[in-house]
Image: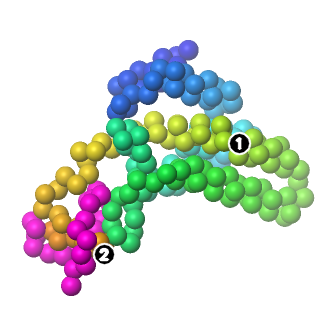
Amino acid sequence: EDFERFLLEYNSNCCMPPLDRSEVLAIVKSVWKYAINNKSSLFEKRTLTELSLAEVVYAENKDDLIWIPHWKAWLKFNDTNGKWEKVEYYVENLITRQLKKLREEESKLVLQTGMDRSSNIKQIERAEKAKFIHGSSEIIKTIQEAQLTPSDFDSNPYLVGFSDGNCFDLSKCEVRKIERKDYLTKSVNAIYD
């Protein structure tokens, strides 16, 4: 009950825009179905949860994950053109890759040690279901550090992005590589020579 109250309050104070109350309650219900795992290993306490999976996926990919609640969209940095771009199913794919990695690690452990790891394999199989993956994805959306607003992008009037991943910084009169922290989503369709 305290966790539910905390999450509802956190949602209304920190999420832009806040999730519907029913969505928050669904997350609470989903999280409490399983033991919460605050350890570094997903299997440290022998339980793989949506929350523990979300924490690991976010920790390993936080430089490439931005959730824009106003747009209801994930953005990923494109190293080639230097722009942050909307991506469909990006987080779900990251979660699926993490589960595949876990499955491979467990299989290696079985081969190396001969130990029975069937409990962990069953947890991975349960986690590979769409509902579990969706739940982990929804939890990542609530992480404050993963969220930005539309006004955070393209806000530097002195940067002109080019389609080759470079930008002209008018404030310093220099051409340089576009960086993630520039938060550009737009560029002119030209290559700087």
Query: Magenta span: helix, strand or loop, mainly?
Result: loop
Q: Could you tell me which residue is drawn at 17 percent across and 71 percent down?
A: 168
Residue 164 numbered tag: 2
Q: Is residue 144 left or right of residue 47?
A: left
Q: Position of residue 58 (x, y in %)?
A: 51, 48
Residue 181 counted in the magenta span:
yes
**Residue 72 placement: quadrant:** top left
Tell me if mark 1 has few (under 14), some (14-19) or many (20+) residues whose alpha carbon lies within 10 angstroms of its own. Answer: few
Question: The residue tagged with tag 2: helix, strand or loop?
Answer: loop
Label 1 to label 2: alpha-carbon separation: 39 Å
**Type of residue at label 2?**
Asp
Q: Is residue 120 left or right of residue 34?
A: right
Residue 79 numbered tag: none
- What stretch of residues is rendered in magenta? 170-193
Q: Earlier in the sequence, mark 1 or mark 2?
A: 1
Q: Residue furthest front?
A: 189
Nearest the eye: 5 or 43: 5
Classify the position of the C terminus by image quarter.
bottom left
Residue 79 counted in the magenta span:
no
Q: Position of residue 133 (x, y in %)?
A: 63, 42
Can I make out residue 66 in this image?
yes
Q: Position of residue 170 (x, y in %)?
A: 10, 68
Q: Is residue 8 above or below residue 127?
A: above
**Total residue callouts:** 2
Residue tagged 1: 129
Question: The residue tagged with tag 1: helix, strand or loop?
Answer: loop
Q: Is residue 50 above or below residue 63?
A: above
